[in-house]
Image: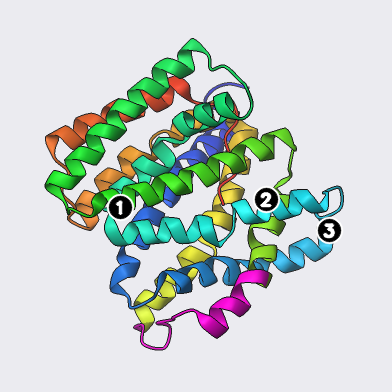
Amino acid sequence: MTPSSPSQVSGYAAAWSIVFVWSFWLIVSRVANQSGLTIYDLAAMRYGLASLVAVPLCLYYKPWRGMALVQIAILSFILGPVYILSVFNGFVYAPASHGGIFMNGILPLVGIVIGIVLLRKNPTPRQIVGAALILVSAVVLAWDGTTTTTETAWIGDILFVIGAVFFSFYVILSERWQLSAMQIIFCGTVVNAALYLPIWAIWLPSGLAEAPMGPLLLQAIYQGFVPNLIGLLFIAHASRRIGNANTSSILAAVPGVGGVLGAVILGENLSIIGMLALALLTVGLLISVRRRAPVPV
């Protein structure tokens, strides 16, 4: 297979599509604050609308077979409301670019810390160098955010880091348990929809009735279907066609692309220091990138 074969071209196209899917998700989630929708509405869209597609698929493939009940419970919790509400709440306080930095960007660093503390797994020299660059860039970007954006940006950054910790546990467990895409969809979408939607409908505040139709449709389509269903197909195709290593390397562009889109579309301030730190972060990601790309949820 030559590098210019149609199969590889479609793989690279799929990988870059994921970059823009995830980067635009940062933008869409940030502008949700102006739509009148609450973070609880966004979570309901993510679980509920995706379940319209996921439930028939799960009934056909029966992905719960081969999973222990404790595995279903743990994975459902990790991909559940605590994770997604932390992330959505982060966008209330911090710019979209910080979402890409402190969620996608620091994943290798968080993964190394979890590996050392819980799994007694020592990082390679390559991972240490990459993690050091990521840590330096994250500290610089956090400091730059408090001086050039809002004084509360650090709150959003902490919430994004919490989301990154949950996502890192998901990546580690999906690898150790060898979970299929359908098993991840079942736990991350269907189980959480069954548990969360009744609570949201009865007790949690909602702005659905007051939200304008345009922003409502944008959030419904993007939160419900694009990152966790369409993105799943793209990443699976890219991994098959160009390999996990190439796919992971391309995904390292998400924080940088997210930062640029935040500046261009939302008018978020991106200082010279911020741009240099983003470049350093991207280098750190490329150095420490994993051999296997995680499935987006």
Q: Viewer-proximal residue, 263 or 187? A: 187
Label 3: few (<14), some or many (≥20) within 10 Å? some
Percent x, y of residue 53: 66, 67
Q: Distance from label 3 to label 2 (Cα)?
A: 16 Å
On the image, numbered disc 3 is attached to which residue? 62
Residue 224's label in the rendered image is none
Alpha carbon separation for disc pair 1 and 2: 26 Å
C-alpha gap between disc 3 and disc 1: 40 Å
Residue to which mark 2 is pinned: 75
Q: Nearer the viewer, residue 19 or 123?
A: 123
Q: Residues within 10 Å of mark 2 (few under 14, many from 20)?
A: many
Q: Which kind of residue does numbered mark 3 sit on?
A: Lys
Q: Quadrant of residue 19?
A: top left
Residue under label 1, please give it: 155
Select label 3 or label 2 by which is in front. 2
Quadrant of the rendered image containing residue 215: bottom left
